[in-house]
Amino acid sequence: MTKVAVVGSQFGIHFFRPKALPEKGETVMAQSYNSEIAAKGLDTAVGCHRLGVPTAYCGCVGEDEFGKRTFEFMDDENMTTKYVVVDKNSFTGVGTCIIEDGGQNYVIVARGANDAISKEDIDKFEREGLFDEIEYMGTGLEINLETMVYAVKRAHAHGVKVLLDPAPVAEFDESIYPCLEFIKPNETEASALTGIDVTNEQSAIQAARWFLAKGVKHVIVTLGANGVVFVDDTHEQYIPSFKVKAVDASGAGDTFGGAFLAGMAKGYDIADAIVFANVAAGISVTKVGCIESMPRLDEVEQFIKDNNIILASAK
């Protein structure tokens, strides 16, 4: 039974890894190149599914090579393709990711078919029983924003707990804030959305309080290697990241989001789900790629065992 769904984006991404970024007007040679299907929506769904929680990806692709690869990849991962729409008039979203030595990444994308997913598609998913089946839904801002807002409201109406990953930052209908169980901005996104300069734990807490005042129930502000701040009406908690040797951080945020949803679906409390997500994200940055770097459950469980991590709420 599907317990989690992610309504979100899908791209074909070209990855270039130069020693340094080019200066204006300069051409540099990449040390390596590869392409893969990857985007916040599909990445988050895969990150959750690989951790033992049946997850549905809901999105839109074009009738092209990257669209074909999306279906093939999902079949290989044993994920349902029931909620993937093909738009013959659009191209599958496409992007370029440049990754410096040390793992810092820079991304530019064209949304393509991600703009084509519609309210009618969400209505179809609803008629097919998606929102009656799932407990949690993730979504983000890389798809048609009116459709995203509509999906959030329909999921909330069914009692589904919704996580919004507000990236890339864009203006959206703030009436959805009370429909959100969780919001997960990083420090840059939190700063842009709240107007508060998030540079440390205290400013992250201040930004989190802004989201709570808007009606969000639980706020998770990620600070990269500096950890996570979790705030709600009864908690104000800093949770550190794990020290690892990072080689590619391009999939870390999506891995965190997927693992957090998996932890919640497994019945963890929020703090333990964040620790679980930190473990998965920490593993992912030690590998190259987005989806390719996302760990499976046995890797996460081994890391937890090797580092004597206790998840008190684990069943």
Image (cartoon, grey):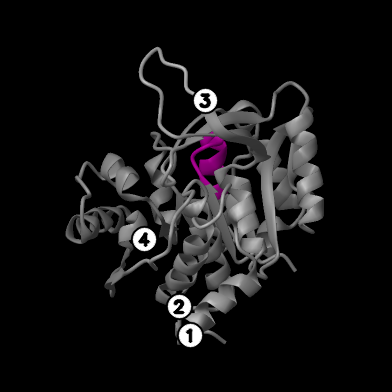
- Front in this rendered view, residue 309 or 209: 309
Q: How many marks?
A: 4
Residue identified by numbered label 4? 220
Q: Is 199 situated above or below 236? A: above
Name the front one of labels 4 and 3. 3
User: Could you tell me how far apart the alpha carbons at marks 1 and 3 are, in whole angstroms?
Assistant: 49 Å
Q: Amino acid at mark 1?
A: Ser
Q: Residues within 10 Å of mark 2 (few under 14, many from 20)?
A: some
User: Could you tell me how far apart the alpha carbons at marks 3 and 2 are, in whole angstroms?
Assistant: 47 Å
Q: Quadrant of residue 228?
A: bottom left
Q: Earlier in the sequence, mark 4 or mark 3?
A: 3
| Magenta-span inclusion, residue 146 | yes
- Front in this rendered view, residue 277 or 90: 277
Residue identified by numbered label 3? 29
Residue identified by numbered label 1? 313
- Element carrying mark 1: loop
